[in-house]
């Protein structure tokens, strides 16, 4: 038998993309980030000095790696293992390494690739690779019993670039990690979710390794049998293998476990002779090589157990460093003897003073590009005592947490927490005590080569090491570990398999394949044999030689290949005498491929292909007879010719890439150095043939099945085969030939030959046995189509007589018998039954229907030969045209004797199983069906269909016996049962109680049917019941289903909602970016969401008006008219004074703009954040003259705080979903050395919205060292706000530096600005929020009454500090009410009451006296408490501490005095704070009514406030009306603020009306002099601002027009007549305006206790008088409202179009005192109430499918929805218009009435459908099928009108294909254009509809298929078939007698009426 050969295709020259890209790369660029000074310059100078000899500078470290792009592998035969050849995406990726540059590209080939990224590092790259890390779900200690590396968590796909001591990690999400390694790395290996590092050996270790190798090679027997001590270069054998499970983790040593169960040893790996040669990810294996023993060992990588780590550490610390003997003991997992594990006892000896040490500084780097510090302990060791520069310390420990999971409880022993670092000196480096570092991973020995068998390799040392290792899996599932030994030209294949419980690997024998090189392919591998030929192997079976078109075939004989060729300059030059080719002439040579023009990158290889037969002759080494002696050259010329030939030979195999579509490419290197890339042909391009091969694998013995695969592959891909043609003719020849058929005499193969019509010789050219003609050849020619075509054009003039065949149209075949020695001759019945099951499987797929006729021919041939009447009838009914094959059954090549000898398996069924008949019986008579045979892993659709039909048709719950009751799996001896059977039983038992259709949908998801596209691929008859189940579940699916279940029922809205975290982070960013409009002049408000504004406020332009009111970047209009008596100079000053008043308003607008634009912008990483300028100039009409403040006196640094507010507003725009890192933050730093207030505000904004934690610690230190006051305030407040409630020790250290009271009394006094101290004291309150920390409470309590200090600021601005201390105390004790343990003895309440009302000071403690030893020399307060300083802070602290406690005593303290005498002792503004604090204590009693507000007023105040005109003539009334009026204003303002806080963001109508009334009342006070004179305009104005802000707080996020109009009126008060309207008033008006549109109408205010506290800080009712006023309340606190803001917007988006839309919502509320209603109905987009008071939220109405969120089931989904910008996906019902298209619903109602009126009409007009649906698919269908004016198509239009009307009106558009299919079959019966498989589906659909109607399993109001339509189709089919019966009764009789004739209607009649087979089988 000649040797098989296959041919590759698409051969092109290969040139790595990176190599071409590197020519245009600028190379490494060293950026000078800072000025070099002093020693830095010296270090820089030394770094440029090299003592290298220069030899390496000219070399280039060049290599590349290829892999398939990551993606789901869709192949049917799973790939074993992973690596560069693993299956993945549809294109390949390339990593190209050149010195210090790595180029990452993707594409299909080098000419279509494009660059992804390029990385350039400072030192040469050792390696670059792809890997995967996992961020675990939990950072707690995992279960110690689980040692698998497959950790659950977030997967990070990475590209790693390895330098000598640095690992650069770049994730696909854009993150970057830089890990400094505490040693030099020689090699890195990728394992499952981790990396392994081999440490570079020191010179001493290398010399020791050489001594060991020499000793082993010279005296092997003595060393193995005696105790001999070898010289040691050091007494400290260090580990050589380390692991890294995540870039943020520490590098840990790897331990190994060797020996058997009873004699296992655990130790570190410190053998210098050990090296890794291979690692795999699945399974997680490692292969090592021992250069001393010359053995390879396989290890399993797993997580190390804690006990193993302790054992390894203990062994390292206790044993000596001597090398023991190597006793020979058998390996633990292999039958052969192995000494490998014994040599690892070397690692168990170590000096008592050393163990691997943990890196002392916790490596907590953020993904910002900062590297980690090297371990000080490791750096002190001799091997690490080398100087290298590490990058700065990364982000602080309070910012990032290490994701390590395997830390044991003992890992913290002897470790000082990071928090204990001395924070007073941040620049100092703190070194922790070293501790033993527990290992992360353990290598467990599985298999090792025998030392005895490897003794021959002992002398080879490193030369016996493998060069390539890979995992391979042959087509029948046998797994191998293959490793190439280049020194011996051996490929060793180690067979292994999983145990039955799949818990361990079992290894078999090693087989050797001679090979020079090898590359892994799918299910096989390609080797370069000893003759330099390419040969394909699968397992250890040779498949065929591989011919690359355009390359010469090697003529080197195998007998001469033991002579190693000499490679000189990349060319193979063997000696002529060695290979016996001295006679070869020079004309034979082909030269270089590129020179010969055989392969170029610009022309396809097919255009230059050389015919295979000609090429063999061309390269023949035997001289032809025509060669003369003169043509024979001397040996030198022969050598030149041979060199030309060998330059085209393959020298090595470089890479292989397996793509997801089955294409496999290999890169070959020729001897000339040229690289070519060629494609290995796939197994087949037919899905059915692939299933047939899988069926053969399942039922045949393994060796037989493997032979079938190899024979088919070599036959299909032989040279000259056209891969564009169908594979079926060859497959039939292959299968029948393997069965022993004489293919040349079989008519079937001739009919299927695609080349037969061209020439009868082509089909037999490759398989012709001889050149001698036979009689059969002449008969074959006469019966061919070629003869018929020739006779049609016959010309009698030629004189030749025409040849007339004996039987026209009937070919003559000479009888023959099968070859009983053929491979499949004894398995014919087995193969027939298996292929039949595949045939039934393919009938369930619509896409495979086209290949079934030719498949049926093959099966019919086998059935006829086997005399299987039932099978013959089965195929005849499906394809009546096959009757010609049945006309002569006497020509079977299987004789009766042979038929009797054929083996009949036990699973063979004499009656052909029919899946459609079985399902039909299951519907009609379920008791009469038995189990259907099934091939696991091959006929999956059959199994799925049966199970789904059973569940849908059965009301009983499925049980474990369900599968065995209806499915009979075929299991052949010698085959392991499929794991899917076990998972199937598990899936069935997991189905929960519920209706049958819900169980059916759940089963679909468990069986892998996860989308409607997969259902569309099924046959219409099969998919109808499945769609019925989906339709019944669609209206109200269960809320606890898996995510994929919603997708399959067509609820894409719920599916996308549940998949929010995976897909919507990008969607949210896109939504924000799409909402951005970039005008020419940016005002900071250009992206507040025009789309959302148009949806919520479609009838007005209120958003544009708000932008106008808050605009501060353009010159203002100075509308001042010059009076005649005013000179020009005075007029200019008058204009500037007016401008100054307007500037007071302009400077206050930034606070409001920050509210409006909160979290509405996604910054660009490469650009700085745009900050709009603060314009303080104007323009005077009509000439638009510029006006500035140059002619009047203005306060110095007037815009300092305003610039700060402007920066905060710009920073608050950044969305919380943005990726902000430390690099980008520093990138926004202003140019130059000076800090700006705007950048300080930007930093505070980052802290408020949660991004400041990404700022590295060193950058924080650098900012603070600048000494910029506003920057320090911003950092302290921002960091504390972000870390609120955490009590983070590192942050506390940062704050304590700026608050001296927290420092020890003996500490150095620092010059900290007073304003920074105020920010730090409030930051302490946020840091310890709700903690009731005793020491902090005690300190804050004392700080409220801190005595004045020596500096001037602490004397004059004490009120602000005292207030901040009081607010901080309230934050720490919020709602604790004195009940906290440890606080009762502090008498906090009494102290606060004393500070509120005044009295004698309490005596200071010793600590306080020490702290306050330096008092002020300017301020003398005496022994009495200064309540003007302490009362505000103490009052609020008391109210916050007793928040919602209903404490009557405290409430009585806080009540306003009820007599004039007592009122005169209280400042009026303190009354506001007392009422506010009283309301906090009595929180539950606060009511949004006027009655409650009036109840807070004392009777005397209610009686005499603003009543001077009434009682001015009554002498008996001695009342100070000014006192009463001021008290009235402040008490009412305090009560209104309490209402605003409690009902913030609720949109409560009662609160709205109450506050509205008081706003109008107070505005009326200002317009009547008689009234405002009694209280003063300033008092009324201040209280008015408090009420307006409270009013806006209630309506927060609503965009209410009444509040907006009021704010616009208040904003317009500018000028001399409004001299009482100060800077603070303008600030509160801007805040009130922006609260209505908080965050672009996406946010609202929360009423949780923490939010109430934040709002008290932000809206404190004491307002600044000018722009730099921070005396009573620091202006930076005004931005703390962000901590109370929460996303409460619901934005519906259509799940199909993605467009936002209007949707009605129904919200059911819990019982509460905020909303009196139990249910509210709103139209989304809208702000919903707080989620804590909502019990249920649902989408209602008839235009969209309902969605529900309930507390007990899917409440977390609603919370997740609000985290992603409130996007709610909804699905529009078919036949409904959106609320934008039909706001009132009139069009839809009218259209439905028109539709019902037209029910009697035959057609439907597009205008009618268009009036109630906008679905483009429906409109296109109506236009093309339902509106025909042609009379011939009128009936079709009528039927289609019925179908589309039924589908649209009843919400089942997916059933429209079923209607079309029924119509197609109905029309095809008459035209005889449909096949019987389609008719069987119609019968099945009819039976199911009838069953559905009879069993009442569905909604009685909806029908699956319109009954009228179904009756019409059935009647039409019955009419056609009955007419056939009447006219063709003779045909029925002939069929019953066993005579088959081609009659389509006959087969239809038999199938439709269930007529059994003539043999009696049904």
Image (cartoon, rainbow, N blue to C red):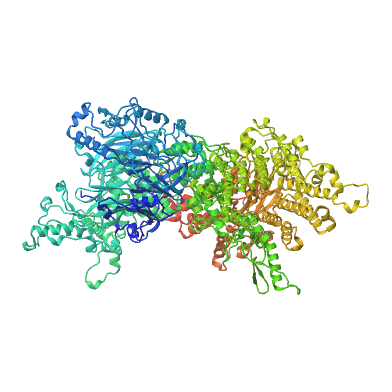
Indicate left or right for 811 with 1940 as reference.
Answer: left
Asked where in the image residue 1067 lies, by quadrant, the reply is bottom right
Most extreme residue toward the top is: 262
Residue 1227 seen in render: yes
In the rendering, at what x and y percent does residue 544 appear?
Answer: 25, 49
**Quadrant position of the C terminus in the picture:** top left
Seen at 66% across and 57% down, the residue is 1148
Above-or-below relation of 922 to 1568 = above
Indicate left or right for 1877 with 1799 as reference.
Answer: left
Most extreme residue toward the front is: 1417
> What is the tally of numbered marks visible in this picture?
0
Indicate left or right for 1775 with 1720 as reference.
Answer: left
Above-or-below relation of 1188 to 1000 = below
| Between 1215 and 914, the one nearer to me in the picture | 1215
Asked where in the image residue 1653 lies, by quadrant, the reply is top right
In the rendering, at what x and y percent does residue 625 appear?
Answer: 9, 60
Indicate left or right for 848 with 1168 as reference.
Answer: left
| Between 1240 and 444, the one nearer to me in the picture | 1240
In the rendering, at what x and y percent does residue 1235 appear?
Answer: 54, 55
In the rendering, at what x and y percent does residue 1791 appear?
Answer: 66, 61
| Between 1500 and 73, the one nearer to me in the picture | 1500
| Between 310 and 1586, the one nearer to me in the picture | 1586
Residue 1779 seen in render: no
Most extreme residue toward the left is: 629
């Amino acid at each position: 038998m000649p040797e098989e050969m296959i041919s590759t295709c698409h051969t092109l020259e290969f040139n790595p993309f990176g190599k071409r890209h590197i020519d245009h790369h600028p190379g490494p660029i060293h950026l000078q980030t800072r000025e070099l000074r002093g020693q830095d310059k010296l270090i820089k100078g030394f770094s440029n000095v090299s003592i290298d000899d220069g030899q390496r500078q000219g070399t280039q470290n060049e290599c590349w790696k290829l892999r398939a792009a990551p993606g789901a592998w869709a192949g049917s035969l799973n790939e074993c293992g992973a690596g560069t050849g693993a299956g993945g995406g549809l294109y390949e990726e390339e990593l190209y390494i050149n010195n210090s540059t790595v180029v990452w590209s993707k594409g299909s080939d080098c000419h279509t690739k494009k660059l992804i990224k390029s990385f350039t590092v400072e030192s040469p790259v050792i390696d670059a690779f792809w890997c995967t890390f996992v961020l675990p779900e939990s950072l707690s200690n995992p279960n110690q019993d689980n040692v698998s590396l497959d950790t659950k968590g977030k997967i990070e796909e990475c590209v790693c670039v390895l330098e000598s001591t640095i690992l650069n990690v770049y994730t696909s999400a854009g993150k970057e990690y830089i890990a400094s390694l505490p040693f030099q790395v020689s090699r890195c290996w990728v394992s499952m979710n981790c990396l392994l590092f081999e440490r570079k050996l020191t010179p001493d270790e290398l010399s020791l390794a050489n001594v060991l190798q020499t000793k082993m090679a010279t005296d092997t027997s003595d060393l193995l049998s005696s105790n001999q001590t070898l010289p040691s270069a050091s007494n400290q054998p260090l580990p050589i293998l380390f692991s890294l499970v995540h870039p943020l983790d520490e590098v840990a040593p790897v331990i190994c476990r060797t020996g058997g169960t009873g004699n296992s040893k655990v130790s570190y790996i410190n053998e210098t002779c050990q090296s890794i040669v291979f690692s795999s990810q699945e399974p997680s294996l490692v292969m090592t090589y021992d250069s001393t023993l010359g053995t390879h060992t396989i290890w399993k990588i797993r997580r190390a157990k804690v006990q193993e780590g302790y054992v390894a550490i203990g062994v390292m610390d206790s044993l000596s460093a001597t090398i023991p003997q190597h006793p020979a003991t058998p390996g633990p997992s292999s039958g052969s003897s192995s000494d490998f594990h014994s040599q690892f006892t070397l690692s168990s000896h170590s000096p008592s003073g050393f163990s691997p040490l943990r890196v002392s500084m916790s490596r907590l780097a953020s993904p910002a590009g900062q590297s980690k510090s090297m371990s000080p302990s490791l750096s002190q060791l001799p091997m690490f005592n080398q100087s290298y520069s590490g990058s700065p310390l990364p982000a602080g420990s309070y910012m990032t947490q290490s994701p390590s999971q395997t830390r044991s409880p003992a890992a913290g022993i002897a470790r000082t927490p990071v928090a204990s670092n001395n924070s007073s000196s941040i620049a100092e480096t703190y070194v922790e005590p070293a501790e033993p570092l527990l290992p992360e991973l353990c290598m467990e020995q599985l298999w090792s080569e025998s030392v005895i068998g490897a003794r021959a390799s002992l002398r080879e040392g490193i030369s016996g090491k493998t060069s390539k290792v890979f995992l391979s899996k042959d087509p029948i599932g046998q797994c191998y570990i293959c490793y190439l030994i280049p020194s011996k030209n051996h490929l060793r294949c180690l067979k292994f398999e999983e145990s039955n419980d799949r818990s361990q690997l079992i290894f078999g024998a090693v087989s050797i394949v001679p090979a020079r090189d090898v590359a892994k392919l799918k299910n096989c591998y390609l080797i370069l044999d000893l003759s330099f030929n390419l040969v394909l192997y699968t397992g250890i079976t040779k498949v065929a030689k591989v011919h690359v078109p355009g390359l010469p075939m090697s003529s080197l004989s195998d007998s001469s290949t033991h002579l190693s060729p000499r490679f000189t300059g990349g060319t193979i030059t063997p000696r002529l005498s060695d290979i016996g080719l001295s006679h070869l002439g020079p004309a034979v040579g082909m030269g270089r491929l590129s020179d010969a023009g055989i392969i170029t990158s610009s022309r396809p290889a097919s255009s230059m292909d050389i015919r295979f037969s000609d090429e063999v002759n061309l390269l023949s080494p035997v001289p032809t007879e025509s060669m003369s002696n003169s043509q024979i050259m001397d040996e030198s010329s022969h050598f030149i010719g041979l060199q030309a030939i060998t330059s085209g030979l393959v020298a090595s195999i470089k890479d292989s890439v397996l793509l997801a579509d089955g294409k496999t490419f290999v890169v070959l290197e020729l001897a000339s150095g040229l690289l070519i890339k060629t494609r290995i042909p796939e197994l087949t391009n037919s899905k059915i043939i692939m299933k047939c091969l899988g069926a053969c694998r399942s039922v045949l013995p393994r060796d037989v099945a493997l032979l079938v695969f190899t024979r088919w592959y070599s036959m299909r891909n032989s040279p000259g085969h056209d891969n564009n043609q169908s594979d079926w003719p060859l497959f039939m020849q292959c299968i029948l030939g393997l069965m022993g058929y004489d293919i040349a005499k079989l008519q079937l193969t001739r009919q299927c030959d695609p080349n037969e019509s061209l020439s009868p010789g082509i089909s037999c050219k490759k398989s012709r046995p001889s050149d001698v003609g036979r009689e059969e050849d002449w008969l074959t020619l006469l019966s061919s189509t070629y003869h018929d075509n020739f006779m049609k054009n016959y010309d009698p003039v030629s004189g030749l007589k025409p040849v007339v065949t004996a039987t026209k149209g009937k070919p003559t075949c000479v009888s023959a018998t099968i070859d009983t020695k053929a491979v499949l001759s004894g398995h014919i019945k087995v193969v027939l039954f298996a292929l039949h099951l595949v045939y039934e499987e393919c009938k369930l797929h619509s896409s495979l229907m086209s290949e079934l006729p030719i498949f049926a021919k093959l099966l019919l041939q086998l059935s006829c030969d086997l005399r299987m009447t039932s099978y013959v009838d089965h195929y005849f009914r499906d394809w009546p045209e096959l009757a010609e094959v049945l006309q002569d059954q006497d020509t079977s090549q299987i004789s009766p004797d042979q038929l009797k000898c054929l083996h009949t398996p036990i699973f063979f069924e004499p009656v052909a199983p029919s899946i459609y008949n079985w399902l039909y019986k299951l519907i009609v008579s379920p008791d009469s069906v038995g189990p259907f045979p099934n091939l696991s892993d091959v006929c999956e659709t059959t199994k799925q269909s049966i199970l789904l039909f059973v569940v849908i048709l059965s009301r009983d719950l499925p049980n474990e016996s369900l599968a065995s009751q209806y499915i009979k799996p075929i299991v052949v001896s010698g085959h392991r049962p499929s794991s899917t059977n076990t998972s199937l039983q598990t899936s069935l038992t997991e189905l929960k109680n519920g209706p049958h259709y819900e169980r059916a949908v759940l089963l679909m998801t468990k069986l892998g049917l996860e989308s409607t596209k997969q259902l569309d691929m099924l046959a219409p008859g099969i998919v109808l019941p499945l769609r019925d189940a989906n339709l019944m579940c669609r209206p109200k699916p269960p809320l606890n289903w898996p995510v994929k279940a919603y997708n399959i029922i067509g609820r894409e809205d719920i599916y996308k909602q549940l998949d929010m975290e995976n897909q919507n982070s990008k969607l949210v960013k896109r939504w924000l970016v799409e909402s951005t409009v970039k005008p020419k002049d940016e005002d900071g408000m250009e992206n507040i969401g025009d789309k959302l504004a148009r949806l919520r406020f479609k009838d007005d332009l209120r958003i544009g008006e708000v932008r106008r009111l808050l605009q501060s970047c353009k010159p203002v209009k100075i509308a001042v008219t010059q009076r005649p008596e005013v000179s020009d100079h005075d007029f200019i000053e008058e204009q500037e004074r007016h401008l100054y008043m307007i500037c007071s308003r302009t400077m206050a607008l930034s606070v409001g703009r920050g509210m409006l634009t909160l979290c509405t912008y996604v910054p660009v990483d490469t650009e700085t954040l745009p900050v709009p300028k603060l314009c303080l100039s104007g323009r005077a009409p009509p000439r638009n003259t510029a006006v500035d403040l140059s002619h009047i006196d203005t306060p110095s640094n007037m815009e300092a705080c305003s610039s700060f507010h402007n920066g905060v507003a710009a920073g608050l725009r950044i969305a919380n979903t943005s990726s902000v890192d430390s690099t980008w933050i520093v990138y926004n730093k202003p140019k130059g050395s000076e800090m700006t207030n705007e950048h300080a505000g930007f930093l505070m904004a980052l802290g408020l919205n949660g991004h400041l934690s990404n700022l590295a610690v060193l950058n924080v230190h650098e900012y603070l060292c600048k000494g910029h006051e506003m920057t320090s305030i911003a950092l302290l407040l921002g960091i504390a706000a972000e870390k609120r409630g955490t009590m983070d020790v590192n942050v506390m250290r940062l704050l304590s530096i700026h608050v001296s009271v927290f420092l020890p009394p003996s500490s150095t006094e620092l010059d900290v600005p007073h304003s920074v101290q105020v920010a730090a004291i409030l930051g302490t309150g946020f840091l310890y929020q709700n903690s009731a920390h005793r020491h902090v409470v005690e300190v804050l309590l004392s700080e409220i009454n801190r005595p004045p200090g020596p500096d001037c600021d602490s004397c004059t601005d004490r009120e602000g500090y005292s207030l901040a201390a009081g607010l901080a105390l309230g934050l720490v004790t919020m709602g604790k009410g004195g009940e906290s343990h440890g606080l009762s003895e502090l008498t906090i309440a009494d102290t606060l009451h004393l500070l509120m009302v005044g009295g004698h000071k309490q005596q200071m403690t010793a600590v306080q006296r020490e702290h306050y030893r330096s008092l002020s020399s300017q301020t003398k307060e005496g022994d009495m408490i200064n309540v003007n300083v302490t009362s505000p802070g103490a009052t609020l602290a008391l109210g916050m501490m007793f928040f919602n406690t209903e404490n009557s005593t405290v409430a009585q303290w806080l009540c306003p005095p009820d007599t004039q005498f007592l009122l005169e002792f209280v400042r009026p503004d303190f009354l506001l704070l007392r009422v506010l604090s009283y309301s906090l204590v009595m929180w539950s009693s606060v009511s949004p009514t006027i009655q409650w507000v009036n109840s807070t007023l004392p009777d005397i105040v209610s009686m005499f406030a603003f009543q001077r005109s009434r009682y001015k003539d009554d002498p008996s009334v001695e009342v100070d009306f000014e006192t009463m009026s001021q008290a009235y204003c402040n008490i009412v303002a305090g009560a209104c603020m309490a209402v605003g806080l409690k009902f913030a963001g609720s949109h409560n109508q009662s609160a709205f009306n109450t506050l509205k009334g008081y706003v109008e009342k107070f505005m009326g006070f200002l317009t009547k002099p008689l009234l405002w004179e009694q209280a003063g305009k300033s008092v009324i104005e201040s209280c008015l601002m408090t009420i307006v802000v409270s009013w806006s707080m209630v309506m927060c996020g609503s965009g209410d027009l009444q509040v907006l109009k009021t704010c616009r009126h208040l904003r317009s008060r500018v000028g001399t007549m409004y001299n009482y309207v100060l800077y603070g008033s303008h600030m509160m008006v801007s805040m009130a305006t922006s609260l209505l549109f908080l965050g672009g109408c996406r946010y609202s205010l929360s009423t949780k206790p923490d939010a109430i506290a934040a709002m008290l800080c932000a809206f404190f009712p004491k307002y600044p008088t000018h722009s730099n006023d921070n005396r009573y309340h620091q202006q930076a606190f005004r931005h703390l409202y962000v901590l109370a803001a929460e996303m409460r917007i619901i934005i519906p988006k259509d799940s199909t179009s993605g467009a936002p839309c209007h949707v009605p919502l129904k919200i059911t509320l819990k019982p509460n005192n905020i909303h009196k209603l139990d249910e509210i109905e709103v139209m989304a987009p809208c702000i919903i109430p707080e989620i804590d008071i909502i019990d249920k939220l649902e989408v209602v109405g008839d235009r969209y499918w309902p969605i529900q969120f309930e507390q007990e089931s899917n409440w977390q989904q609603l919370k997740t929805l609000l985290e992603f910008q409130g996007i709610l996906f909804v699905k529009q019902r078919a036949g409904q218009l959106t609320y934008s298209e039909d706001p009132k619903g009139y069009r839809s109602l009218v259209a439905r009435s028109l539709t019902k009126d037209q029910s009697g009409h035959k057609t439907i007009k597009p205008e009618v459908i268009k009036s109630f649906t906008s679905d483009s698919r429906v409109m296109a269908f109506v236009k093309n099928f339902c509106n025909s004016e042609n009379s011939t198509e009128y009936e079709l239009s009528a039927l289609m009108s019925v179908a589309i009307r039924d589908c649209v009106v009843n919400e089942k558009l997916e059933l429209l294909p079923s209607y079309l299919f029924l119509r197609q079959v109905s029309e095809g019966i008459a035209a005889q254009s449909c096949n019987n498989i389609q008719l069987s589906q119609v019968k099945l659909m009819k039976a199911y509809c009838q069953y559905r109607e009879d069993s009442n399993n569905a909604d009685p109001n909806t029908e699956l298929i319109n009954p009228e339509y179904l009756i019409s189709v059935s009647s039409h089919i019955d009419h056609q078939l009955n007419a056939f019966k009447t006219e063709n009764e003779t045909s029925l009789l002939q069929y019953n007698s066993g005579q088959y004739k081609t009659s389509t209607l006959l087969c239809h009649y038999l199938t439709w009426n269930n007529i059994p087979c003539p043999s009696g089988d049904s």
